[in-house]
Protein backbone atom coordinates (compact mmCIF):
# COMPACT_ATOMS: atom_id res chain seq x y z
CA UNK A 1 0.00 0.00 0.00
CA UNK A 2 2.13 2.85 -1.28
CA UNK A 3 1.32 6.35 -0.10
CA UNK A 4 0.97 9.44 -2.25
CA UNK A 5 3.96 11.82 -2.15
CA UNK A 6 3.39 15.39 -1.04
CA UNK A 7 4.40 16.80 -4.42
CA UNK A 8 1.43 15.11 -6.10
CA UNK A 9 -0.98 17.01 -3.89
CA UNK A 10 0.90 20.27 -4.48
CA UNK A 11 0.82 19.77 -8.25
CA UNK A 12 -2.90 18.96 -8.22
CA UNK A 13 -3.51 22.00 -6.06
CA UNK A 14 -1.44 24.19 -8.40
CA UNK A 15 -3.35 22.97 -11.46
CA UNK A 16 -6.71 23.61 -9.79
CA UNK A 17 -5.58 27.07 -8.71
CA UNK A 18 -4.43 27.81 -12.27
CA UNK A 19 -7.83 26.75 -13.63
CA UNK A 20 -9.45 29.08 -11.10
CA UNK A 21 -7.20 31.98 -12.17
CA UNK A 22 -8.01 31.43 -15.83
CA UNK A 23 -11.70 31.20 -14.97
CA UNK A 24 -11.55 34.57 -13.24
CA UNK A 25 -9.78 36.34 -16.08
CA UNK A 26 -11.56 34.70 -19.02
CA UNK A 27 -15.23 34.57 -18.04
CA UNK A 28 -17.54 37.56 -18.01
CA UNK A 29 -20.40 36.12 -15.99
CA UNK A 30 -19.83 37.35 -12.45
CA UNK A 31 -21.34 34.20 -10.92
CA UNK A 32 -18.86 32.01 -12.80
CA UNK A 33 -16.08 34.34 -11.64
CA UNK A 34 -17.32 33.89 -8.07
CA UNK A 35 -17.27 30.10 -8.49
CA UNK A 36 -13.73 30.26 -9.89
CA UNK A 37 -12.69 32.11 -6.73
CA UNK A 38 -14.27 29.30 -4.70
CA UNK A 39 -12.21 26.85 -6.76
CA UNK A 40 -9.03 28.73 -5.83
CA UNK A 41 -10.09 28.60 -2.17
CA UNK A 42 -10.43 24.85 -2.52
CA UNK A 43 -7.02 24.49 -4.13
CA UNK A 44 -5.44 26.38 -1.24
CA UNK A 45 -7.34 24.27 1.27
CA UNK A 46 -5.95 21.14 -0.36
CA UNK A 47 -2.42 22.47 0.09
CA UNK A 48 -3.09 23.29 3.73
CA UNK A 49 -4.54 19.86 4.46
CA UNK A 50 -1.71 18.10 2.61
CA UNK A 51 0.99 19.99 4.50
CA UNK A 52 -0.90 19.37 7.71
CA UNK A 53 -0.84 15.65 7.05
CA UNK A 54 2.81 15.49 6.06
CA UNK A 55 4.01 17.69 8.92
CA UNK A 56 1.75 15.78 11.33
CA UNK A 57 0.34 19.04 12.71
CA UNK A 58 -3.35 19.83 12.97
CA UNK A 59 -2.94 23.62 12.74
CA UNK A 60 -3.65 23.39 9.02
CA UNK A 61 -7.03 21.83 9.72
CA UNK A 62 -7.98 24.73 11.96
CA UNK A 63 -6.89 27.10 9.21
CA UNK A 64 -9.08 25.29 6.68
CA UNK A 65 -11.92 25.54 9.19
CA UNK A 66 -11.45 29.31 9.24
CA UNK A 67 -11.23 29.45 5.44
CA UNK A 68 -14.57 27.64 5.20
CA UNK A 69 -16.13 30.12 7.66
CA UNK A 70 -14.74 33.04 5.63
CA UNK A 71 -15.99 31.45 2.41
CA UNK A 72 -19.49 31.18 3.84
CA UNK A 73 -19.44 34.82 4.93
CA UNK A 74 -18.09 35.75 1.51
CA UNK A 75 -20.86 33.74 -0.17
CA UNK A 76 -23.53 35.61 1.76
CA UNK A 77 -22.12 39.11 1.13
CA UNK A 78 -20.71 38.48 -2.35
CA UNK A 79 -23.92 37.03 -3.70
CA UNK A 80 -25.88 39.85 -2.04
CA UNK A 81 -23.64 42.29 -3.93
CA UNK A 82 -24.27 40.39 -7.17
CA UNK A 83 -28.02 40.64 -6.58
CA UNK A 84 -27.76 44.35 -5.72
CA UNK A 85 -25.79 45.02 -8.93
CA UNK A 86 -28.27 42.96 -10.92
CA UNK A 87 -31.18 44.96 -9.53
CA UNK A 88 -29.54 48.22 -10.59
CA UNK A 89 -28.05 47.24 -13.94
CA UNK A 90 -30.03 44.08 -14.90
CA UNK A 91 -26.83 42.35 -15.93
CA UNK A 92 -24.19 40.06 -14.45
CA UNK A 93 -21.69 40.72 -17.22
CA UNK A 94 -18.63 42.32 -15.62
CA UNK A 95 -17.83 44.23 -18.83
CA UNK A 96 -21.09 46.14 -18.51
CA UNK A 97 -20.56 47.07 -14.86
CA UNK A 98 -18.06 49.84 -15.56
CA UNK A 99 -19.61 52.85 -13.91
CA UNK A 100 -16.50 53.45 -11.77
CA UNK A 101 -14.34 53.65 -14.88
CA UNK A 102 -13.16 57.24 -15.31
CA UNK B 1 -4.19 1.59 -3.65
CA UNK B 2 -3.89 5.10 -2.20
CA UNK B 3 -2.16 6.22 -5.37
CA UNK B 4 -5.04 4.82 -7.43
CA UNK B 5 -7.62 6.65 -5.31
CA UNK B 6 -5.58 9.83 -5.63
CA UNK B 7 -5.43 9.55 -9.42
CA UNK B 8 -9.17 8.86 -9.73
CA UNK B 9 -10.19 11.79 -7.52
CA UNK B 10 -7.49 14.05 -8.93
CA UNK B 11 -8.43 13.52 -12.56
CA UNK B 12 -12.15 13.88 -11.90
CA UNK B 13 -11.41 17.07 -9.95
CA UNK B 14 -9.35 18.56 -12.79
CA UNK B 15 -11.90 17.48 -15.39
CA UNK B 16 -14.73 19.05 -13.37
CA UNK B 17 -12.75 22.26 -12.85
CA UNK B 18 -11.97 22.61 -16.56
CA UNK B 19 -15.59 21.88 -17.45
CA UNK B 20 -16.68 24.50 -14.93
CA UNK B 21 -14.89 27.35 -16.68
CA UNK B 22 -15.70 26.09 -20.19
CA UNK B 23 -19.44 25.33 -20.13
CA UNK B 24 -21.84 28.10 -21.05
CA UNK B 25 -24.64 27.69 -18.58
CA UNK B 26 -23.96 28.93 -15.04
CA UNK B 27 -26.05 26.06 -13.61
CA UNK B 28 -23.77 23.51 -15.26
CA UNK B 29 -20.75 25.40 -13.90
CA UNK B 30 -22.19 25.18 -10.40
CA UNK B 31 -22.86 21.45 -10.73
CA UNK B 32 -19.32 20.81 -11.99
CA UNK B 33 -17.95 22.81 -9.08
CA UNK B 34 -19.94 20.56 -6.72
CA UNK B 35 -18.38 17.50 -8.37
CA UNK B 36 -14.95 19.08 -7.93
CA UNK B 37 -15.62 19.78 -4.26
CA UNK B 38 -16.80 16.24 -3.60
CA UNK B 39 -13.59 14.90 -5.18
CA UNK B 40 -11.56 17.17 -2.93
CA UNK B 41 -13.54 15.84 0.04
CA UNK B 42 -12.40 12.36 -1.00
CA UNK B 43 -8.79 13.59 -1.11
CA UNK B 44 -9.18 15.11 2.36
CA UNK B 45 -10.35 11.72 3.61
CA UNK B 46 -7.27 10.21 1.97
CA UNK B 47 -5.17 12.73 3.93
CA UNK B 48 -6.79 11.67 7.24
CA UNK B 49 -8.60 15.01 7.54
CA UNK B 50 -11.91 13.45 8.49
CA UNK B 51 -13.60 16.51 9.95
CA UNK B 52 -12.52 18.69 7.03
CA UNK B 53 -13.81 16.11 4.56
CA UNK B 54 -17.20 16.15 6.26
CA UNK B 55 -17.24 19.95 6.39
CA UNK B 56 -16.34 20.13 2.72
CA UNK B 57 -19.44 18.11 1.88
CA UNK B 58 -21.77 19.77 4.39
CA UNK B 59 -20.75 23.42 4.12
CA UNK B 60 -19.13 23.82 0.72
CA UNK B 61 -20.94 21.35 -1.52
CA UNK B 62 -24.07 21.48 0.62
CA UNK B 63 -24.75 24.98 1.83
CA UNK B 64 -22.63 27.42 -0.17
CA UNK B 65 -23.26 25.85 -3.55
CA UNK B 66 -26.98 25.67 -2.83
CA UNK B 67 -26.87 29.42 -2.22
CA UNK B 68 -25.03 29.91 -5.52
CA UNK B 69 -27.59 27.79 -7.39
CA UNK B 70 -30.26 29.79 -5.62
CA UNK B 71 -28.84 33.06 -6.92
CA UNK B 72 -28.55 31.64 -10.44
CA UNK B 73 -32.23 30.71 -10.29
CA UNK B 74 -33.10 34.04 -8.69
CA UNK B 75 -31.48 36.00 -11.48
CA UNK B 76 -32.76 33.51 -14.09
CA UNK B 77 -30.03 34.34 -16.55
CA UNK B 78 -30.28 33.66 -20.17
CA UNK B 79 -26.71 33.34 -21.34
CA UNK B 80 -26.00 35.48 -24.34
CA UNK B 81 -25.29 33.67 -27.54
CA UNK B 82 -21.65 33.36 -28.48
CA UNK B 83 -20.25 34.43 -25.13
CA UNK B 84 -17.66 31.72 -25.45
CA UNK B 85 -16.55 30.77 -28.89
CA UNK B 86 -14.33 27.86 -29.74
CA UNK B 87 -11.47 30.28 -30.11
CA UNK B 88 -11.97 31.51 -26.58
CA UNK B 89 -11.97 27.97 -25.18
CA UNK B 90 -8.63 27.46 -26.90
CA UNK B 91 -7.36 30.66 -25.29
CA UNK B 92 -8.57 29.39 -21.91
CA UNK B 93 -6.71 26.16 -22.48
CA UNK B 94 -3.49 28.00 -23.29
CA UNK B 95 -3.99 30.17 -20.21
CA UNK B 96 -4.50 27.15 -17.96
CA UNK B 97 -1.36 25.50 -19.32
CA UNK B 98 0.76 28.61 -18.84
CA UNK B 99 -0.46 29.41 -15.32
CA UNK B 100 -0.43 25.76 -14.24
CA UNK B 101 3.12 25.41 -15.53
CA UNK B 102 4.28 28.08 -13.10
CA UNK B 103 2.59 26.47 -10.11
CA UNK B 104 3.66 22.95 -11.04
CA UNK B 105 7.20 24.18 -11.51
CA UNK B 106 7.14 25.70 -8.05
CA UNK B 107 5.66 22.53 -6.54
CA UNK B 108 8.08 20.24 -8.37
CA UNK B 109 11.14 22.33 -7.60
CA UNK B 110 10.55 22.19 -3.86
CA UNK B 111 12.54 19.45 -2.20
CA UNK B 112 10.54 17.93 0.61
CA UNK B 113 12.73 14.90 1.17
CA UNK B 114 12.40 15.16 4.92
CA UNK B 115 8.66 14.56 4.90
CA UNK B 116 7.81 13.45 1.39
CA UNK B 117 6.49 10.17 2.75
CA UNK B 118 3.56 10.46 5.10
CA UNK B 119 4.41 8.95 8.44
CA UNK B 120 2.04 7.31 10.84
CA UNK B 121 -0.27 9.71 12.64
CA UNK B 122 -1.91 9.49 16.01
CA UNK B 123 -5.43 8.07 16.26
CA UNK B 124 -6.75 11.54 17.03
CA UNK B 125 -5.34 13.19 13.89
CA UNK B 126 -7.99 14.99 11.88
CA UNK B 127 -10.90 13.72 13.93
CA UNK B 128 -13.53 16.03 15.40
CA UNK B 129 -12.01 15.82 18.89
CA UNK B 130 -8.49 16.40 17.60
CA UNK B 131 -9.32 19.50 15.58
CA UNK B 132 -11.61 20.79 18.32
CA UNK B 133 -8.83 20.56 20.91
CA UNK B 134 -6.53 22.68 18.72
CA UNK B 135 -9.29 25.10 17.76
CA UNK B 136 -10.64 25.78 21.22
CA UNK B 137 -7.35 25.98 23.11
CA UNK B 138 -4.66 27.37 20.80
CA UNK B 139 -6.87 29.41 18.47
CA UNK B 140 -9.39 31.14 20.75
CA UNK B 141 -8.88 34.61 19.30
CA UNK B 142 -9.38 33.58 15.64
CA UNK B 143 -12.43 31.65 16.77
CA UNK B 144 -13.95 34.67 18.51
CA UNK B 145 -13.04 36.96 15.63
CA UNK B 146 -14.82 34.52 13.30
CA UNK B 147 -18.03 35.34 15.18
CA UNK B 148 -17.49 39.05 14.50
CA UNK B 149 -16.90 38.20 10.84
CA UNK B 150 -20.17 36.29 10.68
CA UNK B 151 -21.93 39.22 12.38
CA UNK B 152 -20.56 41.58 9.75
CA UNK B 153 -21.67 39.15 7.04
CA UNK B 154 -25.22 39.11 8.45
CA UNK B 155 -25.42 42.90 8.64
CA UNK B 156 -23.84 43.42 5.23
CA UNK B 157 -26.07 40.95 3.46
CA UNK B 158 -29.23 42.28 5.11
CA UNK B 159 -28.35 45.89 4.22
CA UNK B 160 -27.48 44.93 0.64
CA UNK B 161 -30.62 42.93 0.06
CA UNK B 162 -33.08 45.14 1.93
CA UNK B 163 -32.07 48.44 0.34
CA UNK B 164 -35.00 50.10 -1.38
CA UNK B 165 -33.65 52.27 -4.12
CA UNK C 1 -8.27 4.65 8.78
CA UNK C 2 -9.45 4.54 5.17
CA UNK C 3 -11.43 1.37 5.84
CA UNK C 4 -13.92 3.48 7.78
CA UNK C 5 -15.05 5.01 4.51
CA UNK C 6 -16.20 1.71 2.99
CA UNK C 7 -19.82 2.30 4.17
CA UNK C 8 -19.66 5.72 2.49
CA UNK C 9 -18.53 4.02 -0.71
CA UNK C 10 -21.44 1.57 -0.50
CA UNK C 11 -23.77 4.51 0.10
CA UNK C 12 -22.47 6.33 -3.00
CA UNK C 13 -22.73 3.18 -5.13
CA UNK C 14 -26.26 2.51 -3.87
CA UNK C 15 -27.39 6.09 -4.50
CA UNK C 16 -25.84 6.28 -7.96
CA UNK C 17 -27.17 2.82 -8.80
CA UNK C 18 -30.69 3.74 -7.74
CA UNK C 19 -30.68 6.94 -9.75
CA UNK C 20 -29.23 5.45 -12.95
CA UNK C 21 -31.28 2.27 -12.52
CA UNK C 22 -34.49 4.28 -12.34
CA UNK C 23 -33.65 6.23 -15.47
CA UNK C 24 -32.65 3.09 -17.39
CA UNK C 25 -35.69 1.12 -16.24
CA UNK C 26 -38.17 3.86 -17.10
CA UNK C 27 -36.71 4.29 -20.57
CA UNK C 28 -36.75 0.52 -21.13
CA UNK C 29 -40.11 -0.36 -19.57
CA UNK C 30 -42.18 2.80 -19.82
CA UNK C 31 -44.66 3.18 -22.69
CA UNK C 32 -43.71 5.87 -25.17
CA UNK C 33 -46.78 7.64 -26.38
CA UNK C 34 -46.04 11.18 -27.37
CA UNK C 35 -48.95 13.44 -28.26
CA UNK C 36 -49.61 17.06 -27.49
CA UNK C 37 -51.72 16.56 -24.36
CA UNK C 38 -49.12 14.23 -22.91
CA UNK C 39 -46.43 16.88 -23.24
CA UNK C 40 -48.34 19.48 -21.19
CA UNK C 41 -46.87 20.26 -17.76
CA UNK C 42 -50.16 19.17 -16.15
CA UNK C 43 -51.50 16.41 -18.30
CA UNK C 44 -55.17 16.66 -17.39
CA UNK C 45 -55.18 19.88 -15.36
CA UNK C 46 -55.30 23.55 -16.17
CA UNK C 47 -52.75 24.98 -18.59
CA UNK C 48 -49.92 26.90 -16.92
CA UNK C 49 -50.51 30.64 -17.01
CA UNK C 50 -46.88 31.82 -16.80
CA UNK C 51 -43.39 30.74 -17.66
CA UNK C 52 -42.30 28.35 -14.90
CA UNK C 53 -38.71 29.62 -15.16
CA UNK C 54 -39.62 33.09 -13.92
CA UNK C 55 -37.68 34.87 -11.19
CA UNK C 56 -38.82 34.29 -7.66
CA UNK C 57 -38.96 36.52 -4.63
CA UNK C 58 -35.89 37.99 -3.02
CA UNK C 59 -37.25 37.02 0.41
CA UNK C 60 -36.11 33.47 -0.29
CA UNK C 61 -32.59 34.72 -0.78
CA UNK C 62 -32.45 36.58 2.53
CA UNK C 63 -33.57 33.45 4.37
CA UNK C 64 -31.02 31.30 2.49
CA UNK C 65 -28.22 33.77 3.26
CA UNK C 66 -29.06 33.83 6.96
CA UNK C 67 -29.19 30.04 6.90
CA UNK C 68 -25.59 29.90 5.61
CA UNK C 69 -24.30 32.14 8.39
CA UNK C 70 -26.07 30.25 11.16
CA UNK C 71 -25.05 26.99 9.53
CA UNK C 72 -21.44 28.03 10.11
CA UNK C 73 -22.33 28.77 13.71
CA UNK C 74 -23.68 25.21 14.04
CA UNK C 75 -20.49 23.89 12.44
CA UNK C 76 -18.45 25.65 15.12
CA UNK C 77 -20.76 24.33 17.87
CA UNK C 78 -20.37 20.73 16.73
CA UNK C 79 -16.66 20.17 17.55
CA UNK C 80 -17.12 22.21 20.70
CA UNK C 81 -19.83 19.83 21.89
CA UNK C 82 -17.54 16.84 21.30
CA UNK C 83 -14.87 18.04 23.72
CA UNK C 84 -17.16 20.06 25.99
CA UNK C 85 -16.46 17.98 29.11
CA UNK C 86 -12.71 18.44 28.67
CA UNK C 87 -12.95 22.20 28.26
CA UNK C 88 -15.25 22.79 31.25
CA UNK C 89 -16.22 26.32 32.32
CA UNK C 90 -13.58 27.88 30.07
CA UNK C 91 -15.16 26.29 27.02
CA UNK C 92 -18.62 27.41 28.11
CA UNK C 93 -17.52 31.04 28.47
CA UNK C 94 -15.70 31.08 25.14
CA UNK C 95 -18.67 29.62 23.30
CA UNK C 96 -21.08 31.97 25.08
CA UNK C 97 -19.11 34.97 23.77
CA UNK C 98 -19.26 33.48 20.27
CA UNK C 99 -22.98 32.78 20.42
CA UNK C 100 -23.78 36.17 22.00
CA UNK C 101 -22.09 38.01 19.13
CA UNK C 102 -24.24 36.07 16.69
CA UNK C 103 -27.36 36.67 18.80
CA UNK C 104 -26.65 40.38 18.33
CA UNK C 105 -26.74 39.69 14.60
CA UNK C 106 -29.99 37.77 14.91
CA UNK C 107 -31.53 40.58 16.95
CA UNK C 108 -30.42 43.07 14.29
CA UNK C 109 -31.97 40.98 11.53
CA UNK C 110 -35.17 40.65 13.52
CA UNK C 111 -35.40 44.36 14.29
CA UNK C 112 -34.63 45.25 10.68
CA UNK C 113 -37.54 43.07 9.61
CA UNK C 114 -35.52 40.93 7.20
CA UNK C 115 -37.35 37.84 8.39
CA UNK C 116 -40.75 39.35 7.63
CA UNK C 117 -42.41 37.63 4.71
CA UNK C 118 -43.77 40.23 2.35
Image (spheres, coloured by chain):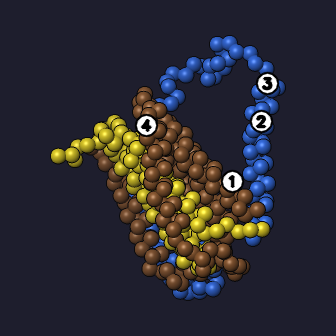
Which sits earlier in the primary sequence, circle 2 or circle 3?
Answer: 2
Marked residue chain, label 1? B
- Check disc 3 and report its element: helix, strand or loop: loop
Chain B color in figure: brown
Please, is residue B74 above or below residue A50 in the view? Answer: above
Cα distance in 3D space between marks 1 and 2: 26 Å
Residue hosting label 2:
C22
Question: Quick check: can you spot residue C54?
Answer: yes
Cα distance in 3D space between marks 1 and 3: 35 Å
Q: Are marks 1 and 2 on the same chain?
A: no
Query: Residue B13: percent from the left, percent from the top?
Result: 60, 52
Quadrant location of the N terminus of chain B?
bottom right
Question: B29 or C26, which is in the foreground?
Answer: B29
Q: Are marks 4 and 1 in contact (CB under 8 Å)?
A: no
Q: Which mark is residue B17?
A: none
Quadrant location of the C terminus of chain B?
top left
Q: Are marks 2 and 4 in contact (CB under 8 Å)?
A: no
- Residue at image point 47% right, 32% down: B86
Residue hosting label 1:
B8
Amino acid sequence: METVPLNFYLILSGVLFAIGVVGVVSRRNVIVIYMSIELMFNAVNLTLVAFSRFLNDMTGHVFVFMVIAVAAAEAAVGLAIIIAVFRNKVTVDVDEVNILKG
Amino acid sequence: MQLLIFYVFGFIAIFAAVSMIVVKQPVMSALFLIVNMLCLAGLYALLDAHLIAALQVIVYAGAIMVLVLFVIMLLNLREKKGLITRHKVAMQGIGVVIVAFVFVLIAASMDFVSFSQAGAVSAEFGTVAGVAKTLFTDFILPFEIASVLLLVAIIGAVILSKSRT
Amino acid sequence: MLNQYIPVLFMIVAAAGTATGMIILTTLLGPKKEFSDKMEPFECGVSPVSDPASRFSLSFYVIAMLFIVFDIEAVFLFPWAVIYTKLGVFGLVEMMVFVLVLVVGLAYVWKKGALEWE
